[in-house]
Image (tube, grey):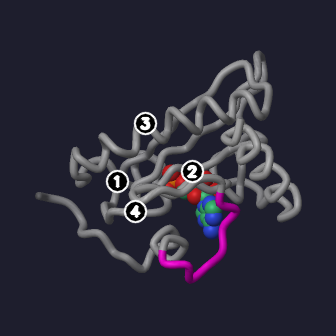
Amino acid sequence: MSGQAYDSNNIFGKILRGEIPCHRVYEDEDTLAFMDVMPQSPGHLLVVPKAPSRNILDADPAVLSKVIPVVQKLARAAKEAFEADGITVIQFNEPAAGQTVYHLHFHVVPRYEGQPLKPHSGQMENNDVLAANAEKIIGELGN
Ligand code: AMP
């Protein structure tokens, strides 16, 4: 395969290994989901397959087939938990496309009629707000 190799020394690799913390909302054998620290809308979360790949271009289709149902589950939960009008799912591949962290991930972003998104990788959210938002999603998943 062409393109750059996966480098496990990326921030999501570190989160997956437990080397740095995250506001976790969901985990199973293959997938971890946690709050984005620079949310583009309240409730913005990331769904990350545990298997290493840089992005969708080098991912194993078997990994994609496991992660997409989790994206759906979290999209439904975030829509309910944040009383959103819609959900945007975003996934960037390589710097030219806006990717900044090189471990495959899907953004799940609650949306509201007429409200534009805040900038990508913009402002850090307060930890307490992220923790409270994570609890809302966890609560919804429990329902
Ligand atoms: P992308 O451009 O798709 O690679 O987006 C990476 C996303 O990761 C951005 O939305 C960042 O706000 C987010 N991010 C960066 N560092 C962290 C972190 N330590 N925990 C959670 N989200 C992060």
Instruction: Write the start and end of the magenta stretch as one range.
Output: 17-24
Element at label 3: helix
Three-letter amino acid code at the position of disc 3:
Pro
Disc 3 crowd, CA 10 A, few/some/many (<14, 14-19, 20+): few
Q: Position of residue 13 (x, y in %)?
A: 45, 72
- Mark 1 vs 2, N-terminal side: 2
**N-terminal label among 3 and 4:** 4
Tell us which disc is closer to us: 1 or 2: 2
Q: How many marks?
A: 4
Indicate the amino acid at tag 1.
Asn
Residue at numbered disc 4: 50
- Viewer-nearest of discs 2 and 3: 3
* Residue nearest the observer in this picture, 141 or 89: 141
Residue depicted at x 43% and y 36%: 69
Residue position for label 2: 46
Which mark is drawn over residue 69? 3
Q: Nearer the viewer, residue 2 or 78?
A: 78
| Horizontal and vertical percent position of residue 121 | 64, 54
Q: Residue furthest left?
A: 1
Q: Earlier in the sequence, mark 3 or mark 1?
A: 1
Residue 8 lies, in percent from the top left, at: 37, 76
Residue placed under numbered mark 1 in the picture: 55
Marks 3/4: CA–CA distance: 15 Å
Give the CA distance from mark 4 to mark 2: 12 Å
The reply to whether dot 3 and dot 4 touch (C-beta < 8 Å) is no
